[in-house]
Image: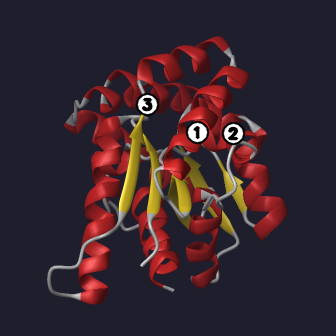
Amino acid sequence: MKTIGLLGGMSWESTLTYYQVLNEEVKKKLGGFHSAKIVLYSVDFYEIESCQKGGNWDKTAEILGEAAKRVEAAGADLLLICANTMHKVADEIAQYISIPILHIADAAAARIKERGFSTAGLLGTKYTMEQDFYRAHLNEKHGIATIIPDEVDRELIHKILYDELCLGTVDNSSRGEFVRIIASLHDRGAEGVILGCTEIPLLVSQEDTPVLLFDTTRIHAEEAVKWALA
């Protein structure tokens, strides 16, 4: 079994899910007392969020690149960046290390294509929904077109993510808003919807909507286990 490296803490609430899913999947596949071999470096999200808000993406790449070096030095064979948004600087992080990075959008795209879908709704931070790094990756590398919510709903989603979920607050009214937005994306042609922020599954699950959801947190972890056990 190879060792999976995690860049976590963005936020730590969703990093918990990564740790749980990785171990559950290894146990499911190997049985008995087996668990995942993991190296975790958890950053201070305050520093990352401050850089995001200020548009200082170069600094986030430096912080995460240095952290990635420590993960590799601790024995990781593969790196997972445990945040969709921070894949904006995945290429820069890769320059700090020699081990591969499993891109979260590649993992999601594989599941979407398994369903035969070519158009998906995308929920996430404003950075993920509005900037080109994530949507272009899906479109140019995998031929998957994305539909995003309107501006008012993008603002609402971003606020719920940072003011509630990243702080550990789960609110039923916010769940209702997400379910409404998911339905609207489906009405506009989305065959399924990508939960493109690792905190969203803390609020919304497949039980809440008939629209097929692609939980990037779980998918990312499951694909990492496949790689580690290959």
Spatial CA span between label 1 and label 2:
6 Å
Q: Is residue 189 visible?
A: no
- The quadrant of the picture occupied by the N terminus is bottom left
Q: Residue at x 52, y 41 (%)?
A: 70
Q: Amino acid at mark 3?
A: Val
Q: Badge 1 local density, few (<14 within 10 Å), some, or many (20+)?
A: many
Mark 2 = which residue? 88
Q: Are marks 1 and 3 in contact (CB under 8 Å)?
A: no
Marks 1/2 in contact by CB < 8 Å: the verdict is yes
Instruction: Examine the rendered structure and indicate whether residue 216 appears above or below residue 129.
Output: below
Q: Which residue is mark 1?
A: 85
Mark 2 Cα shell of 10 Å, populated few (<14), some (14-19), many (≥20): some
C-alpha distance separating marks 1 and 3:
15 Å
Q: Residue furthest left?
A: 32
Q: Separation of disc 2 and disc 3 at Cα? A: 17 Å
Considering only order in the chain, which callout, 3 or 1, is on the residue closer to the N terminus?
A: 3
Q: Residue 32: horizontal and vertical position, in percent?
A: 15, 86
Label 2 element class: helix
Could you say which disc has been placed on residue 43 in the image?
A: 3
Which residue shows up at 67% across the image and 49% down it? 97
Where is residue 191? Give x, y as percent. 58, 69
